[in-house]
Amino acid sequence: MARIFLVEDDKGIARNLVLLLRAEGFAVTHAATRKEAAAALGSEKFDLALVDISLPDGNGFAVCTAVREAQNCPVIFLTASDDEASVVTGLGMGADDYIVKPFRPRELIARIEAALRRSGHSQSVFEVGGLHVDTAGGVVKKNGEEVFLSALEYRLLLVFLRNPGSIVTRGKLLDELWDAAGEFVNDNTLTVYIKRLREKIEEYPASPRTILTVRGMGYRLGHSDVEE
């Protein structure tokens, strides 16, 4: 589970971001000021920092410098405007990316995941039952034999692997597939993709143990032994 450090002084934005990130399977620590951020950096370890440029007791540039010196993890700036000077300053100080408020939740998650992959802080190998998934190489194996998935089937599998122990709603799955697909995906086609994926990764597709249906709610990963 990747650990995200959120430095944001707006209580409403911070609350919504914490809920979003935790729903995506991230652990989140929040600091509202530069002083709180400094204290957290001295006591916790993080995989990525989301830093607001405007803070009540300073600015995010100082926090970025502190993050890079203390932990050298990726930094993504959150900014209320696309002011070119601020963006250039932030990137010049070592930030990995920036995103302008208001932003789409899926875009933010995609930026975070990309930064984690580039930095090597994201989990790249998953073991679930007899399934082995190497996301760095895009390889899926079942009991040692490679399984070939379509792009959408693979994306669907990744959603479950990155949300172990959580119920994944059909709405969330549709959002994920919509972002990745060049074709229209609706509720009926989602059912088809779930069926196809189960046929490829389950020992007994009619009695699935890896992707379980939670009636009236969605699906969840059936094995609790997801390991890196």
Image (tube, rainbow, N blue to C red):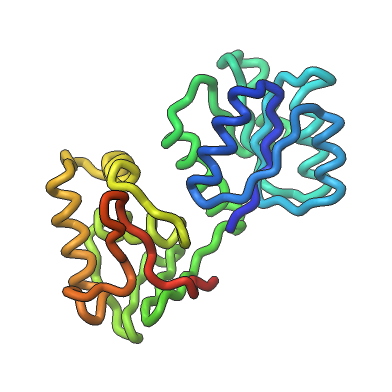
Q: Where is residue 190 in the image (x, y as percent from the top left)?
A: 19, 50
Tell me how many marks there are.
0
Q: Is residue 43 left or right of residue 161?
A: right
The residue closer to the viewer here, 40 or 64, is 40
Q: Residue at x 70, y 37 (%)?
A: 30
Q: In this view, does 207 lie to the left or right of 15?
A: left
Q: Position of residue 228 (x, y in %)?
A: 54, 71
Q: Where is residue 20 in the image (x, y as percent from the top left)?
A: 51, 38
Q: Is residue 139 left or right of residue 96?
A: left
Q: Which residue is drawn at 59% across and 16% down?
A: 80
Q: Residue at x 71, y 23 (%)?
A: 9
The residue closer to the viewer here, 211 or 148, is 211
Is residue 101 positioned above or below 195 on the image?
above
Q: Position of residue 203 (x, y in %)?
A: 25, 81
The N terminus sits in image quarter:
bottom right
Is residue 195 positioned above or below 107 on the image?
below
Outermost bottom residue: 144
Q: In this view, does 203 lie to the left or right of 28?
A: left
**Quarter of the image where one finds residue 55:** top right
Is residue 141 positioned above or below 221 on the image?
below
**Quarter of the image where one finds residue 93:** top right
Q: Residue at x 40, y 79 (%)?
A: 129
